[in-house]
Image (cartoon, rainbow, N blue to C red):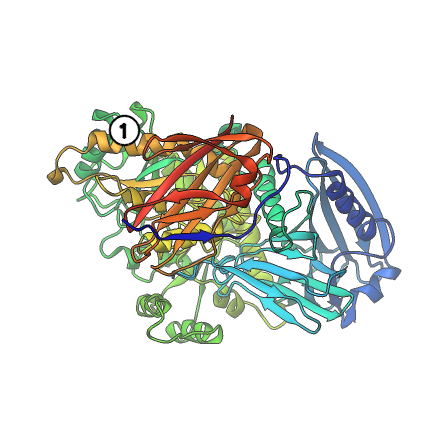
């Protein structure tokens, strides 16, 4: 049979293999940046307008103090306080400096220490920096968010020409809805990764005012408010991580070093630590809350009887209330016809066999017909849109909605519009008493149900609720208190239940940012996982920025389903049981799970795309995960259903050019040797006979 071969080449790595570790030059770049912006002079990396005057004019006259304290062996905190003696406005900037990464994080606290209401504070930007440019064409790399379509997490590129201007917002008040709040700007041989920690309506603007500079600004999209005496607010958290090409990567791909530094930095410093241990994502068996307890018990029993390597049993929505689950948010009574004895029989069986339990909640959306709707009688506990559906439609149409009917996002728009009701309210987690009530309520449920994972969904776009609640001179305050309250709510839960894990959902992965990823994990990154190609595209994009995430759609572990299963493989795996009508699938199930477990470690490594991003059914797509500390890695490739090519040549990254590698084809068991330089220049030949089909190949240094 004639074999067609496609050579898929992005870049190659030439030189000695090595870990993606910070270099002295990168650490110096971070230190120099700190010295420039926090060195005791008037230079600061933030800006605002106070009483109509720009902060750079005001702060030169303000009193400034600073101190440094050690947090741990790798972190120190530098605090700088700026005080306006006339108005009493005090700004405290807290900057975290890392000894193990070329990274700086900071956020601001603004407090009115005076005895009267302060003048208007607006356009509060915790990041406002101007960077020198040595190249004519700096390039900004960023990504779409979770729009509920195949485009989710699609890589985006913007060449920053003179006078170019790009402003990004998530839309709707959930932090990764339209765009991810992670960015990498490549200045040619060096660059900087920036990230925002704010689970609300952030804004990031990138512009090039002249040939010599690029300006970056970020903050809350809308602030126009007065602070009352004694009142304090915080800003989004900002991260800058500096990278320089020390690996002789081709110019077009040097920026990948910055992204891999980011992945490693997140795993080191922004990773949940249940029980004091770094979180490892589970293998999950997911199920629906509308099933009867007997069905769940039977499924769990099948796991135990067949000794299947599954860590976590997930029960999703529809276990509560008195009817259709969408309209029951706010009625958290267990459906007795489904669960006559509650969830304890299920959790007891799981715990007896060393497995964990996850249950879905959506506590921030309150429907009119539910008991919690009465909480509106408590002042400030629930936020309402007076115009209901009309307000929702206005917001959508104001951010490139509605879209054409042929666009798959139209389905999501129509769905939300039809589900929106006049009485739907937003639970105001920013109200202290409301937050305390919610913490106590959920704490009781965690104990009663025996939860190991709390799955928090957020199927409501909150920004218009926030805006409507604010007076003209308090714009932004409700959002700020809401986001502060969300973090306090999660932190209180994790203090009360130190082994608890939080699954952060918001109509899929619409709340991914620097603040959430250290407290929670995205086990369901998008509501639009319709088929394998969608999952491949979502993985391709999100792997660039985030090491811990999962495809929420469980792939059935059945005979002949390897392509689907491998398409949803990430640092964790969501699966479904085989249909008993098809016979006993135990051995096939065990083999597939064992196969995944054998390669799971690689998804925590450095990520390199090996093909261009593509949604086409006629293309291949693939990537490499490298563990340089182990001199080993994984290549994952997919031949889609209409591709005519049976073989692809994939050029690998970060190998030792003068060394020999052992290659193992996991499917065929074939072993062979290859030279590192040849693998990086000529490529690894991958053959896939089936269409669609997939390949898994491991490599290690001989």
Spot occupied by residue 43 in the image (x, y as percentages of width and height) = 83, 57
Q: Which residue is drawn at 41% across and 54% down?
A: 537
Residue 439 is left or right of residue 45, and the answer is left
Percent x, y of residue 690: 28, 47
Q: In this view, does 532 lie above or below 391?
A: above
Label 1 sits on a secondary structure element that is: loop
- Residue at numbered disc 1: 308
Camera-nearest residue between 434 and 47: 47
Foreground residue among 210 and 371? 210
What percent of the width, then of the height, locates residue 455?
39, 44
Residue 441 in view here: no
Q: Residue 88 appears in which quarter of the rendering?
A: bottom right
Direction front: furthest residue:
2
Nearer the observer, 37 or 685: 685
Quarter of the image for residue 218 reads bottom right
* Residue under the image location 32 percent in, 48 percent down: 553
Q: Residues within 10 Å of mark 1 (few under 14, many from 20)?
A: some
Q: Nearer the viewer, residue 220 or 227?
A: 220
In the image, 248: left or right of 461?
right
Write the residue at 69% across / 35% down: 100
Q: Can residue 445 be seen in this view?
A: yes
Please give left or right for residue 664 compared with residue 32 in the image.
left
- The residue lying at 62 percent from left, 38 percent from top is 20
Q: How many labels does the image show?
A: 1
């Amino acid at each position: 049979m004639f074999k067609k071969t496609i050579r898929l080449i992005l870049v190659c790595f030439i030189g000695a293999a090595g870990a993606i570790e910070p270099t002295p030059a990168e650490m110096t770049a971070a230190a120099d940046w700190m010295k420039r912006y926090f060195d005791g002079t008037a230079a600061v990396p933030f800006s605002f307008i106070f009483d109509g005057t720009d902060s750079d004019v005001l702060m030169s006259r303000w009193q400034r103090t600073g101190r440094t304290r050690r947090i741990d062996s790798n972190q120190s905190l530098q605090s700088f306080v700026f005080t306006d003696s006339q108005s009493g406005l005090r700004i405290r900037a807290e900057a975290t400096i890392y000894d193990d990464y070329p990274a700086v994080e900071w956020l601001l606290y603004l407090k009115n220490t005076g005895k009267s209401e302060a003048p208007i504070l607006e356009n509060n930007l915790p990041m406002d920096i101007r960077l020198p440019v040595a190249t004519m064409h700096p390039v900004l790399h960023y990504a779409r968010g979770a729009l509920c379509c195949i485009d989710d997490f699609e890589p985006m590129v913007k060449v920053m020409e003179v006078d170019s201007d790009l402003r990004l917002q998530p839309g709707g008040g959930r932090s990764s809805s339209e765009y991810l709040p992670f960015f990498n700007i490549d200045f040619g041989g060096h660059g900087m990764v920036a990230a925002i920690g704010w689970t609300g309506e952030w804004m990031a603007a990138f512009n090039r005012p002249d040939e010599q500079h690029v300006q970056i600004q970020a903050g809350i999209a809308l602030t126009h408010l007065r602070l009352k005496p004694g009142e304090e607010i915080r800003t989004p958290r900002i991260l800058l991580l500096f990278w320089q090409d020390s690996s002789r990567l081709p110019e077009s791909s040097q920026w990948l070093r910055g992204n891999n530094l980011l992945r490693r930095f997140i795993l080191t410093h922004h990773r949940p630590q249940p029980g004091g241990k770094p979180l490892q994502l589970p293998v999950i068996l997911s199920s629906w809350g509308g099933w009867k307890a007997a069905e769940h018990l039977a499924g769990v029993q099948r796991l135990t009887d067949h000794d299947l390597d599954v860590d976590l049993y997930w029960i999703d929505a529809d276990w509560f209330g008195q009817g259709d689950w969408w309209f029951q948010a706010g009625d958290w009574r267990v459906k007795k016809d489904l669960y006559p004895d509650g969830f304890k029989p299920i959790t007891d069986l799981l715990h007896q066999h060393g497995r964990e339990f996850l249950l879905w909640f959506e506590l921030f959306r309150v429907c009119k017909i539910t008991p919690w709707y009465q909480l509106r009688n408590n002042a400030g506990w629930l936020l309402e849109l007076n115009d209901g559906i009309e307000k929702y439609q206005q917001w959508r149409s104001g951010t490139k909605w509605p879209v054409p009917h042929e666009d798959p996002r139209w389905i999501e728009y129509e769905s939300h519009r039809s589900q929106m009701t006049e009485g739907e309210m937003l639970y105001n987690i920013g109200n202290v008493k409301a937050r305390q009530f919610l913490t106590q309520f959920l704490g009781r449920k965690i104990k009663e149900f025996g939860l190991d994972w709390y799955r928090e969904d957020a199927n409501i776009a909150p920004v218009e609720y926030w805006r409507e609640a604010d007076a003209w001179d308090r714009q932004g305050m409700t959002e700020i208190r809401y986001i502060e309250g969300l973090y306090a709510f999660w932190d209180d839960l994790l203090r009360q239940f130190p082994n608890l894990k939080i699954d952060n959902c918001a109509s899929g992965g619409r709340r991914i940012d620097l603040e959430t990823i250290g407290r929670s994990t995205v086990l369901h990154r998008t509501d639009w996982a319709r088929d394998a190609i969608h999952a491949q595209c979502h993985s391709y994009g999100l792997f660039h920025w985030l090491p811990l995430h999962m495809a929420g759609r469980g792939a059935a572990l059945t005979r002949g389903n390897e392509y689907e299963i491998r398409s949803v493989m990430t640092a964790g795996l969501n699966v479904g049981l085989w249909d008993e009508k098809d016979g006993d699938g135990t051995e096939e199930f065990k083999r597939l799970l064992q196969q995944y477990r054998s390669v799971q470690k690689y998804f925590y490594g450095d990520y390199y795309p090996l093909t261009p991003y593509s949604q086409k059914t006629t293309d291949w797509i693939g990537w490499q995960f490298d563990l340089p500390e182990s001199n080993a890695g994984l290549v994952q490739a997919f031949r889609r259903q209409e591709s005519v090519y049976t073989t692809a040549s994939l050029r690998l990254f970060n190998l030792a050019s003068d060394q020999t590698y052992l290659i193992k084809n996991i499917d065929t068991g074939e072993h062979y040797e290859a030279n590192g330089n040849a693998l990086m220049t000529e490529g690894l030949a991958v053959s896939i006979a089936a269409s669609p089909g997939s390949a898994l190949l491991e490599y290690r240094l001989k």
